[in-house]
Amino acid sequence: MRILIVAVVIVVLLVLAGFLLSARIVKQYEQGVLFRLGRVRGPKKPGFTLIVPIIDVLHRVSLRIVTMPIQSQGIITRDNVSVDVSAVAYFRVVDAVKSVVAIENVYAAIDQIAQTTLRKVVGQHTLDETLSETDTINLDIREILDVATVAWGVEVTLVELKDIQLPESMKRAMARQAEAEREKRAKIINAQGESLAAAALGEASDSMMAHPLALQLRNLQSLVEIGVDKNTTVVFPAPLMSTIGELGSFLAREKAAAAGSSAVPTTRPPVAPGPITEAGPSFVKQPVVVLPEREIPLNGGRAVPQR
């Protein structure tokens, strides 16, 4: 009786051990690949499954997206500039059987091919294209990786350039280039402003020529603007002083004409003052009336010209 009990216990323990050895659990984000005597029996869905101990081998493959950083690569661009470029790749397994059977270590293989592809693609572009056309470079790298990894059951979902390190001399040269570009734009804008201002002044001068009083009104407006700040300096515009000088000349000529040709003016005609400056008042030159010569008879019969 005791022997029977011991045998039953041994059988139960063997069955329990066999159950533990054959029981497998595949998680929701995984897929199992079953090998029986070295041959692929097919994928196993997530959940509980039983295998034959010693005969069957179950490999679990994660189907989640994997983030793989691509270490910095020293690359020479097409215009012979040395840069260090690092990137990051995102991929996931879409065929668990191929990822186990077609390649030994899919993660190491993708890391190596991503580094070589990054160096190849960036080397085909210039430095300016590498800095400005990152989207195009990312797309080219992804397409090349997709072609290489499709046989491994892997899909590359995204590739992004993460960092681009430039030499210090190149950074200084780019800074000088950017400064020169901004100075050029500033000079162009200044020249365009001068051109517009010159055109506006030309139109204003044409308007003043058509309307002479507009210049006098502008002068009066300037006087009003000067007097706003309670300034003690008195400014007389040049056209106003010229008008005063012309008026003085006219009065002098009228006076000379009224005196007649026989009268000699004993005094000079009034001179209109010119514009007041720091050196003192200036005077406007007036024309001198010249009378015709006449002869005065003397005792000797000779005529002496007299002015």
Image (cartoon, helix red, strand yellow):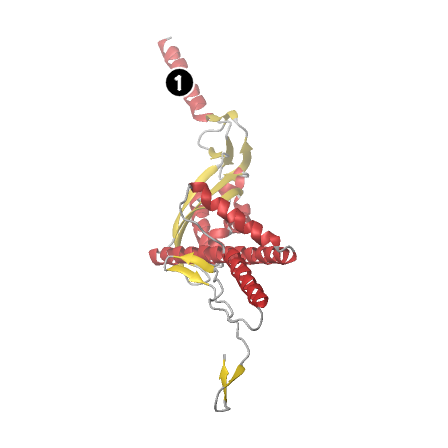
Pick the front one: 7 or 146? 146
- Residue at the spot 49% in from the left edge and 52% down from the top edge: 132
Pointer 1 residue: 13
- Residue at the spot 55% in from the left edge and 46% down from the top edge: 150
Amino acid at pointer 1? Leu
64 over 129 or under it: above or below: above
The percent coordinates of residue 53 (x first, y second) are: 45, 29
The percent coordinates of residue 97 (x first, y second) are: 53, 39
242 over 305 or under it: above or below: above
Pick the front one: 175 or 123? 175
132 over 295 or under it: above or below: above
Q: Which residue is the extreme one toward the top?
A: 1
- Residue at the spot 44% in from the left edge and 56% down from the top edge: 183
Q: Which residue is the extreme one toward the front?
A: 299
Pick the front one: 254 or 124? 254
Pick the front one: 134 or 100? 134
Disc 1 on helix, strand or loop?
A: helix
The percent coordinates of residue 46 (x first, y second) are: 52, 27
